[in-house]
Amino acid sequence: MTKQDDDRAAILAVVEAETDAYLQHDYEAWQSCWHDADEIQRIQTHVGSGVTVTKGPAVRDQMRGIFAQAQTWQLPRRFQRENYSIVIGSDMAWVSYDQIGDAPSIPKDIPGQYHELKILQKVDGAWKISCLVSTQIRTTSTQSPMIEVDGEGRVLEMNTSAQDRLPDHPLLYLKANRIWARGEDALVHLQEAVTWVATIRTRHTPCVGEEAVIRSVPLGQDDAGLAHICWVLLRDGKLLITFDDRERLKTQLNTAGEVYQLSEAQQKLAHHLVAGRDLAAAADAMDISTNTAKTHLQRIYDKTGVRAQPALVRILLSADRRDV
């Protein structure tokens, strides 16, 4: 083995040893993997809680506190790592990888996938960690179906929800490893949305204003008369297609209500119409007369500037779209 091979093996051994120490709550073993210096840092980005930067002696205090706490959830038994990249210098090295804990031991409300970068220094002939940068990947925090595609709509990866749901979806399907929509108009809108998000990605800084990079695509109604929508969006620099996301739909329609200044009754009617109900069924669900529902609908038309329900659905679902 060459010296480079020896260093690589030693660096990976330190990464594994630090992880094992964390899983075992063994502070002494964890400490032995880290450089004992004031310049050490732990930089972590978590979904929903932002960035935490800890430096110097505070890093050790932080870990003592973590190890001293009783766990309210079961730690992973192990971590899976992939996409390793290792660069080694004479006395400095960095290693990066994607990491996820074994799924059975992580509650659904604790997303488990990260991208990690560790910077190591050679101290008295031994490799020690001097900096950790850990970034939680947001796309794993959703339970909704999520499909990563390239700029041509080719599927790169799916989460478990998408794998389970897509084969039975009435209006979306796979063809030649691409996502297709049933219905010519829906397919055109889907392809245009993918192209738009892909174009934005080429000139967009990931995670900066990504909430604005989203296109909703009305897919039409299934045989039971239920309306379906999917969204094409940018998250963590990935081009994604998601569907069956009731919370996203609710948020989008609430935004439409604010944009067009719809009354509470008008917003409720809009929700029913987007869900695929006709006017009579919507009136029945709201416990109002059909004539009252017609009045609400006319006022929605006046406020949105459209005169047909398909156009109304499209404009309501795109009301939160912003120029990027």
Image (tube, grey):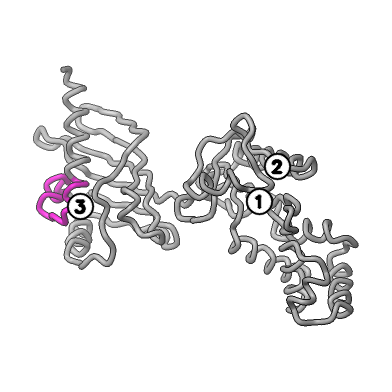
- Pointer 3 residue: 22
The residue at 53%/43% (across/down) is 237
Residue type, mark 1 in image: Cys
Residue type, mark 3 in image: Tyr
From the top left corner, tell me how far across and down residue 126 is, in percent.
12, 35
* Residue 53, placed above or below residue 98: below
- Residue lying farthest to the top in this orientation: 1
Mark positioned earlier in the residue sequence (3 or 1):
3
Q: Quadrant of residue 81?
A: top left
Q: Which mark is residue 181?
A: 2
Q: Which mark is residue 230?
A: 1
Residue type, mark 2 in image: Ala
Tell me the crowding category of disc 1: few under 14, some 14 to 19, or many 20 or more residues within 10 angstroms, Cα based: many
Towards the viewer: 117 or 246: 246
Q: Which residues are magenta?
A: 18-36
In this rendering, the label closer to the viewer, 2 or 3: 2
From the top left corner, tell me how far across and down residue 133 is, in percent.
33, 47
From the top left corner, tell me how far across and down residue 288 is, in percent.
80, 82
